[in-house]
Amino acid sequence: MTVESTAARTPRRSAGSKAGTTGTKRTRTTAKKDAGTEPQLVQLLTPEGKRVKNAEYDKYVAGITPEELRGLYRDMVLTRRFDAEATSLQRQGELGLWASLLGQEAAQIGSGRATREDDYVFPTYREHGVAWCRGVDPANLLGMFRGVNNGGWDPNSNNFQLYTIVIGSQTLHATGYAMGVAKDGADSAVIAYFGDGASSQGDVAESFTFSAVYNAPVVFFCQNNQWAISEPTEKQSRVPIYQRAQGFGFPGVRVDGNDVLGVLAVTRWALERARSGEGPTLVEAFTYRMGAHTTSDDPTRYRGDEERQAWEAKDPILRLRRYLEASNHADEGFFQELEAESEALGKRVREAVRAMPDPDHFAIFENAYADGHALVDEERAQFAAYQASFADEGGN
């Protein structure tokens, strides 16, 4: 089934316009079934791997080549392999924590490949696939989770900000950056990633308000993976998340987050809209977190096997493979070569993590102030004395 978002056709509003709404009390049941509120889903590739038409979004992937399709498949496979290796490394004690993206590969690769080099990305802590698309070395993502650095890459080298652990705050950073882009007169766009749980944060609501009022060129990309740790989506919002954009005066659209072609098309549309001065867009990628929230979580305590099995049938990688095979765009040799490449990637990442040097204990005090500060100097001296106390104890 393929339908298009009515919210996507919302007329452009000026920066100074206001939106007014009225509401009445409704029960939980009728709130979900009122006319006009039924969730609408953009889908270009079915779970069975069949290409379906969409009058509004087909043009954004009309020129995609078999080579590019194989590239999307390769991106998803290698991202999943890297993610699996990171999970294993955490279980072996090499990482302190890891947030897996298993099941969300299409949402991240599709949106990541929709960006231009001059666009700027603000991630959370799970956007490993987007980082891959932006050219960040997978090994560099692991330094923070190993505890040897505070980020691991220069954000301005790839226009990809450092991972944000605080839930939802990166949407404010993205909005402010986008407002600056608009003032500079650039035609680039900004994209901010967050989850369904973060949609309940006040920071996200403030971001929606400021971006709408100032017509900021930003795309809010919500990966609705159904669970905010152990809280289901229905405890985050009374309406589908994409519909919440309407109250702020800009369009929202829900896309099948396991359909890499659909995500690519919708994100391209939203980014082009931002670059052309039409303001923000909310994209809700409807997907599923196949694994735990992080490696410290046990999802079996709050969700059943039946739910996971139903979503396994919608696997984003299997979906695209079926399409490639049915269209004769890839042969067995391609898949075998990719399997070897993925194993080589896992080995490289594993070796890189284990070879990471311990950080300089005093690096945390550097660059806090451009010209130094007496309080930082005092704290540095206290920390030095604390470190020296261990050496004294060892000598006795």
Image (cartoon, grey):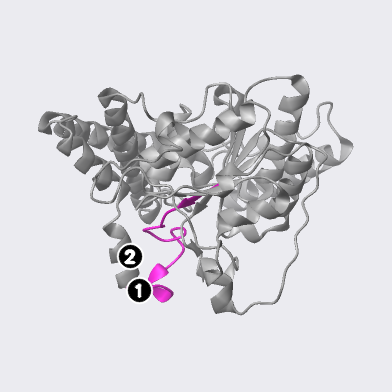
Q: Residue at x 29, y 49 (%)?
A: 46
Q: What is the number of callouts on the image?
A: 2
Picture coordinates of residue 82, whole percent (x, y): 35, 41
**Residue under numbered circle 1:** 304
> Could you classify mark 2 by the number of other residues whose Cα lies within 10 Å: few (under 14), some (14-19), or many (20 or more)?
some
Kindly report the distance in space between the C-alpha atoms of the residues bearing marks 2 and 1. 7 Å
Q: Is residue 109 left or right of residue 182?
A: left
Q: Which residues are magenta?
A: 283-304
Q: Is residue 216 left or right of residue 126?
A: right
Picture coordinates of residue 61, whole percent (x, y): 39, 30
Depth order, front residue of 221/157: 221
Quarter of the image holding residue 184?
A: top right
Picture coordinates of residue 241, whole percent (x, y): 57, 57
Q: Is residue 252 left or right of residue 100?
A: right
**Residue under numbered circle 2:** 308
The amino acid type of the residue labelled 1 equals: Gly
Picture coordinates of residue 252, whole percent (x, y): 58, 48
Q: Is residue 295 magenta?
A: yes
